[in-house]
Image (spheres, rainbow, N blue to C red):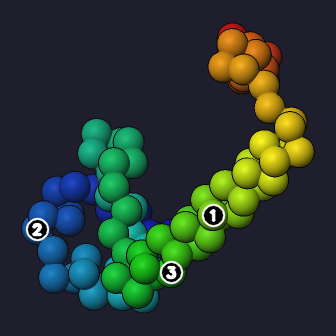
Amino acid sequence: MKTITSTEAKTNFGALLNSAQRAPVTIEKNGHPVAVVMAHEDYEQYMQMKQRDLDEALRIGIEAADRGELIDGEEAFRLLAEEFGE
């Protein structure tokens, strides 16, 4: 993925838009990535994929609830803390 500075993005905005039609472009500020510019079609595909993933996670959760496989909030947070080492 191409990376440019925020100054380059501002100075060459038209070129940035043209580049983003071919492949996503990362914009950095002070050496840190802060944004990605991508073609609208790619963004729409990403959002559809994200929605499918969320729908699948919800379906799995509902099926688990229907089977009575539930845990309370306290247990959920304990498991998350274990998983992320907190």
Contact, mark 2 vs mark 1 (Cβ under 8 Å): no
- Check whether the beta carbons of the residues at disc 1 and disc 3 lie within 8 A of each other: no
Q: Which amino acid type corresponds to the residue marked 1 in the rendered image?
A: Asp
**Cα distance, mark 1 to mark 3?**
15 Å
- CA distance separating discs 2 and 1: 41 Å
Q: Residue at x 37, y 62 (%)?
A: 36
Q: Nearer the viewer, residue 1 or 69?
A: 69
- The tag on residue 25 is none
Q: Earlier in the sequence, mark 2 or mark 1?
A: 2
Q: Answer left or right for 65 relative to 30.
A: right
User: Amino acid under label 2?
Assistant: Thr
Identify the residue at horizontal 11%, vertical 68% (top origin): 11
Q: Nearer the viewer, mark 2 or mark 1?
A: 1
Residue farthest along the left direction in this orientation: 11
Q: Mark 1 packing: few (<14 Cα in 10 Å), some, or many (20+)?
A: few
Q: Earlier in the sequence, mark 2 or mark 3?
A: 2
Q: Nearer the viewer, residue 79 or 38?
A: 79
Residue annotated with mark 3? 45
Residue topped by disc 1: 55
Q: Which mark is residue 11?
A: 2
Element at label 2:
helix
User: Rounded to the nearest whole Å, what is the CA distance between mark 2 and mark 3?
Assistant: 29 Å
Q: Quadrant of residue 16?
A: bottom left
Camera sees residue 84: no
Q: Position of residue 77 (x, y in %)?
A: 68, 18
Q: Amino acid under label 3?
A: Gln
